């Protein structure tokens, strides 16, 4: 058949046998699972056997894009990876951007399946029909930046690169990858999985093009949307500041009483002292990726790529970091090795607290702990290269929890992944709640909408977003019925729809970041989807497909032994957080109610109920599985 | 060459919208490798924008560049 939007091809790479083949896609599967995260889940359910070791030859990596990627559709450049992740032991997706997905589509593939384990270090090169496993001996041991630069140079600076650093090679369980040395991809251990397979990098470059079914309709839709984006009053400030506009870290530090430090990560420092060049993912009209350059002092001349300056700036919440240049340098090292800056930040703070309390000491760690920059750098090196105590830390939070009961109780971790957004600081929105229920562990992206768009907003504003996201009107009443009336919204129930909306975006290939996703609605996605593919789906088809995908993800993890017992709110959330001179409590989205364990459990009940799942075990019921035609995956 | 278009590479963000749109308008497919405008070293510190033979000066790339990297020369009477 003739494909539009889709290429109709899945690349199948067996590293053990050095065998490469192409699988033709099936129209019925496409209509059931759409693409991107959806087809990823379908393939994973068929290929990943329950109970396997994530770092064994049996594990499979599937990387996919959606039908809109490779076209000019605004913000459609997402790439999604699924595998069994070593940090949590869960089968989970991770999402990234930059140019890998764009090139993969241009090369003629929607998805890549990577199985087995190479005998020697290799990298996978996908150049249209020329697909090859190349010798990576000379780049094995190099960091991500050097690896990517070499591969870019080989391909005239125009290819997508997913690469691992030394942390991935050394099987650090939280190691991730970077796409085009900018976009983090695979929090929770995708880097270690690639390392276990001796796969240093994946390169994509294509020249085949992506066709669409209905150019006339597409033109009409594109011109209307792009003009709306072009004329958006806040577009200039988004592009000037990027994500710093949405999360001013300096404000948080000021709240902590650290005004001098707050100035180190101000808009002014970013614009005057750091910003080198703004870069964008293919087709993005809201460019927000950063090339930074330190222009003075000890690290003068350091060039750093990041998906946002807020990533290094968030590390400044650590008392060991006082200046922007030391922070960027530490963050650069983390990225080069392929570690996770979020985990390193949380881990450093945790180790500091444990040392202060006398739970950890020199005899455990092998060195005298100090809350300073040099200790942070030492820790990063120790983990990436598994030196001394770093070998234990490289095994992840579960290993630390096994060492000591107090540590197990006090760590802010869900299913082996550390919490990203602290609700005692940011209150309990869908993003914070998602960290508890996401099958992967404390993952935030799939819980983003709409509370980060509608922060502190009115009920009417929420309704506008609900309609945009395609939440059925019939669900509104229950979403506005929280466990306590004054809470305003029921975050448990709303999170179900946040996940479904994220699934629609990442199945089609659209960016979920607030500044892009705000321009999209289920209605406009359906219209673009039909114009691109030539199909005739209705909004309900996409909504149902998203629900099907999320349930399949849950079924896979049910088979891995996950249930309600794992959807646990960290105990520390129920105690006040000391933040400077303030004591912050775990509060609802509007700050009207302190969340108790009773309310938290009610919100979990409500989340499962809204999903149509069993409240006791937190899993899909047989009735729901049948409704979604997923019986064969049980 | 495209004598009517002024290039400001410092403003280019590497979004490739110009290439995508050019190929779509002229080839009916999103195939940036065949666009008459090419952006090289997209994520380098110094991207390079050039026009290939066959460019008709239609100005569509300028119209859809959202970052000011391409502008039309003012034509004197």
Image (cartoon, coloured by chain):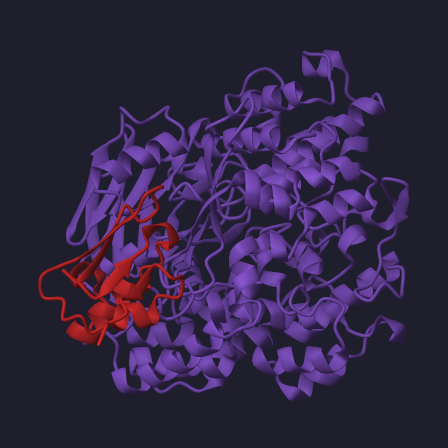
Near-viewer residue (B46 or A590): B46
Q: Is residue A117 visible?
A: no
Residue A121 higher or lower than A88, as above or below:
above
Residue A240: x %, y % from top left: 53, 55
The residue furthest front is: B77
Colour purple belongs to chain? A
Q: Is residue A522 left or right of residue A370?
A: left
Q: Is residue A175 left or right of residue A21?
A: right
The residue at the point 82 percent across, 67 percent down is: A590
Q: Quadrant of residue A613?
A: bottom right
Near-viewer residue (A438 or B5): B5
Near-viewer residue (B48 or A28): B48
Q: Colour of chain B?
A: red
Residue A504: x %, y % from top left: 49, 71
Q: Is residue A617 left or right of residue A142?
A: right
Q: Is residue A181 visible?
A: yes
């Amino acid at each position: 058949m003739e494909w539009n939007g889709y290429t109709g091809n899945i690349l199948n790479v067996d590293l053990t046998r050095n065998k490469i083949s192409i699988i033709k896609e099936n129209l019925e599967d496409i209509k059931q699972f759409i693409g991107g995260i959806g087809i990823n889940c379908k393939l994973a359910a068929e290929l990943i056997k329950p109970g396997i070791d994530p770092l064994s030859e049996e594990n499979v990596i599937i990387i996919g894009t959606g039908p809109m990627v490779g076209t000019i559709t605004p913000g459609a450049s997402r790439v999604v990876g699924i595998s069994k992740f070593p940090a949590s032991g869960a089968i989970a997706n991770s999402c990234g951007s930059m140019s890998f997905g764009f090139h993969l589509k241009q090369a003629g593939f929607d998805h890549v399946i990577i199985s087995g384990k190479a005998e020697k270090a290799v990298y996978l090169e996908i150049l249209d029909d020329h697909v090859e496993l190349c010798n990576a001996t000379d780049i094995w041991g190099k960091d991500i930046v050097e690896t990517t630069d070499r591969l870019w140079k080989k391909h005239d600076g125009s290819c997508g690169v997913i690469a691992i650093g030394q942390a991935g090679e050394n099987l650090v369980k939280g190691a991730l990858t970077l796409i085009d040395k900018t976009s983090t991809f695979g929090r929770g251990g995708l880097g270690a999985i690639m390392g276990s397979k001796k796969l240093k990098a994946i390169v994509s470059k294509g020249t085949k093009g992506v066709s669409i079914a209905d150019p006339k309709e597409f033109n009409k839709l594109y011109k209307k949307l792009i003009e709306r984006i072009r004329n958006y009053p806040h577009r200039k400030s988004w592009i000037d500041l990027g994500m710093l506009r949405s999360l001013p870290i300096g404000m948080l530090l000021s709240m902590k009483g650290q005004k001098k430090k707050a100035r180190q990560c101000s808009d002014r420092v970013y614009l005057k002292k750091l910003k080198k060049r703004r870069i964008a993912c293919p087709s993005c009209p809201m460019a927000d990726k950063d090339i930074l350059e330190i222009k003075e002092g000890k690290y003068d001349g350091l060039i750093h790529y990041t998906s946002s300056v807020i990533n290094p700036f968030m590390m400044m919440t650590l008392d060991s970091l006082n200046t922007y240049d030391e922070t960027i340098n530490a963050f650069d090292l983390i990225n080069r090795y392929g570690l996770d800056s979020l985990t390193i930040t949380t881990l450093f703070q945790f180790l500091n607290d444990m040392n202060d309390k006398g739970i950890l000491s020199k005899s455990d760690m092998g060195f005298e702990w100090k809350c300073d920059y040099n200790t942070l750098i030492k820790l990063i090196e120790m983990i990436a290269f598994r030196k001394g105590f770093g070998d234990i830390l490289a095994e992840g939070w579960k290993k630390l929890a096994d060492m000591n009961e107090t540590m197990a109780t006090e760590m802010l971790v869900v299913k082996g992944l550390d919490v990203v957004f602290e609700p005692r600081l940011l209150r309990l929105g869908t993003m914070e709640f998602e960290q508890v229920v996401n099958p992967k562990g404390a993952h935030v992206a799939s819980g983003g909408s709409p509370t980060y768009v509608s922060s502190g907003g009115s009920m009417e504003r929420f309704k506008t977003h609900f309609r945009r996201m395609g939440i059925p009107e019939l669900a509104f009443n229950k979403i506005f019925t929280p466990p306590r009336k004054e809470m305003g919204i029921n975050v448990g129930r709303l999170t179900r729809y946040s996940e479904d909306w994220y699934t629609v975006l990442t199945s089609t290939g659209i960016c979920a970041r607030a500044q892009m996703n705000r321009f999209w609605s289920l209605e406009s996605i359906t219209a673009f989807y039909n114009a691109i593919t030539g199909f005739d789906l209705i909004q309900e088809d996409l909504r149902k497909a998203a629900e099907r995908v999320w349930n399949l993800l849950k079924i896979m993890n049910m088979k891995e032994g996950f249930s309600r017992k794992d959807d646990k709110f960290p105990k520390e959330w129920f105690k006040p957080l000391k933040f400077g001179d303030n004591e912050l409590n775990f509060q609802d989205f509007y700050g009207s109610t302190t969340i108790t364990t009773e309310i938290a459990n009610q919100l979990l009940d409500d989340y499962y109920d809204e999903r149509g799942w069993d409240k006791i075990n937190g899993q899909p019921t047989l009735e729901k599985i049948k409704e979604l035609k997923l019986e064969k995956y049980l | 060459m495209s004598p009517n278009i002024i290039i400001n590479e410092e403003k280019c963000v590497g979004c490739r919208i110009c290439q995508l749109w050019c190929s779509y308008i002229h080839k009916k497919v999103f195939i940036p490798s065949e666009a008459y405008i090419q952006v090289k070293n997209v994520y380098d510190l110094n991207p390079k924008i050039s026009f290939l033979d066959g460019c008709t000066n239609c100005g569509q790339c300028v119209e859809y560049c959202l970052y000011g990297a391409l502008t039309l020369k003012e034509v004197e009477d």
